[in-house]
């Protein structure tokens, strides 16, 4: 009887400013698709970071929304 296939996966979560998500994804998804194809990973974006908080820059007094990024293999 064949042994069942066991797949091990790893993932890493981090946050980036929401304004940079478009640069990672690229035009028509080219950037993120290239990463997925070359590295064989799954990349997911969510609108809010882990705690949903917003960071305020002291110099510009702007509110920076964070996006959570999860990369898994």
Image: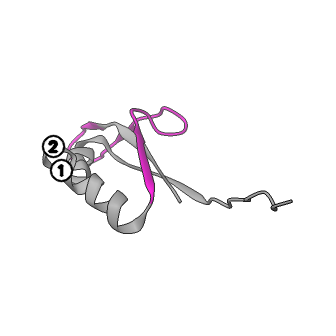
Left/right placement of residue 51 relative to residue 21 reads right
**Chain part drawn in magenta:** 41-63
Give the foreground label among 1 and 2: 2
Is residue 56 depicted above or below 59 in this figure?
Answer: above
Q: Is residue 59 visible?
A: no
In the rendered image of this protein, does residue 47 appear above or below residue 31?
Answer: above
Nearer to me, 43 or 68: 43
- SS at mark 2 in the image: helix
Total tally of numbered discs in the picture: 2
Residue 45 in the image: state x and y as whole percent.
40, 41
Q: Position of residue 51 (x, y in %)?
A: 54, 35
Q: Residue furthest front?
A: 1
Q: Is residue 36 above or below residue 45?
A: below
Between 1 and 29, the one nearer to me in the picture: 1
Compared across the picture, whether 22 is left or right of 42 comes to left
User: Where is mark 2, residue-wise?
Assistant: 28
| Colouring style | one colour
What secondary structure do most residues of the magenta stretch adopt?
A: loop
Residue 24 percent location from the top left of the image? 25, 53
Quickly name the residue at label 1. 26
Helix, strand or loop for disc 1: loop
């Amino acid at each position: 009887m064949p042994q069942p296939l066991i797949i091990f996966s790893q993932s890493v979560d981090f946050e980036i400013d929401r304004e940079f998500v478009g640069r990672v994804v690229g035009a028509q998804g080219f950037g993120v698709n290239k990463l997925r194809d070359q590295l064989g990973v799954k990349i997911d974006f969510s609108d809010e970071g882990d705690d949903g908080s917003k960071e305020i820059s002291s110099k510009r007094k702007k509110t920076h929304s964070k996006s959570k990024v999860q990369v898994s293999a």
